[in-house]
Image (spheres, rainbow, N blue to C red):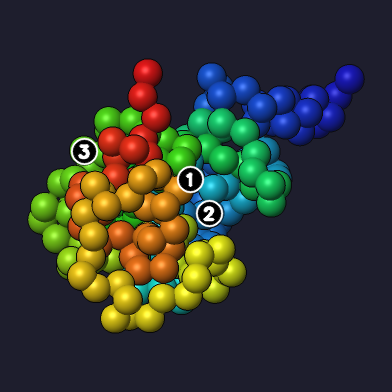
Amino acid sequence: MQLRTILPALLLCLVAMPAWAWPALVERVVDGDTIQVRADRRTLTVRLSGIDAPERGQPGGIQAGQALAELVAGRSVEVVPEGRDRYGRVVARVELAGRDVGTILVRAGHAWQFTRYDDGPVLREAQQQARRERLGVWADPDPLPPWRWRAKDQPVTASPASRDACRPAPRCAAFVSCAEAMAWVGRCGPGRLDGDGDGVPCEAMCRPTG
């Protein structure tokens, strides 16, 4: 079998094997957490794993895309694949000169730790530092995470609440379940329910233990 035939097949195998990394050239930055790379004469769309950047129409979205472009556009990176998402994108860690690009973005306040997929201490500490220093999105004392931004136009099962109905903001002790707390956050924003800004409100109820 010719080498030209073997290499594309090998690349597809590497995408499915998280332990392997492969070099790529960043051809385009799509948004604050998505890039297109060239590897073995193929163009692949890569979604950075473990983070969630503001959407382009959301405050901080343009700045997030610019920050990612300044980091990686036109540069060689290492792609460490973890799988594919429902859109067919490669979900991967992307490393630049040995540094994780997602962590750099979170540390600069241009992305959140996406705790639904990565609840690790590295991103958590990076986000806490950015928040303490009010970098990027954290210049706003109560920024809306991208997953809430995307959900804001979706139907809410709870009854509609006006802005006045969201005041005064309750404490976690006022809720009987995580689902009730999440419904409030969906209507009114996290407020003080998400004290550490990691996207998980009322952590004693909502964060799995064990």
Q: Is residue 38 above or below residue 99?
A: below
Contact, mark 1 vs mark 2 (Cβ under 8 Å): yes
Q: Is residue 6 left or right of residue 180?
A: right
Circle 1 packing at 10 Å, graded few (<14), some (14-19), many (20+), is many
Q: Position of residue 13 (x, y in %)?
A: 71, 25
**Mark number for residue 48?**
1
For the residue pair 141 and 154, the one nearer the viewer reads as 154
**Identity of the amino acid at label 2?**
Ile
Confirm whether residue 150 shows in the render: no
Q: Is residue 50 left or right of residue 85?
A: left
**Mark number for residue 125?**
3
Confirm whether residue 13 shows in the render: yes
For the N terminus, the image quarter is: top right
- Badge 2 marks a residue whose secondary structure is strand
For the C terminus, the image quarter is: top left
For the residue pair 29 and 26, the one nearer the viewer reads as 29
Q: Which residue is mark 2?
A: 35
Q: Is residue 36 left or right of residue 165?
A: right
Q: Is residue 85 above or below residue 135?
A: above
Circle 2 packing at 10 Å, graded few (<14), some (14-19), many (20+), is many
Contact, mark 2 vs mark 3 (Cβ under 8 Å): no
**Identity of the amino acid at label 3?**
Glu
For the residue pair 46 and 8, the one nearer the viewer reads as 46
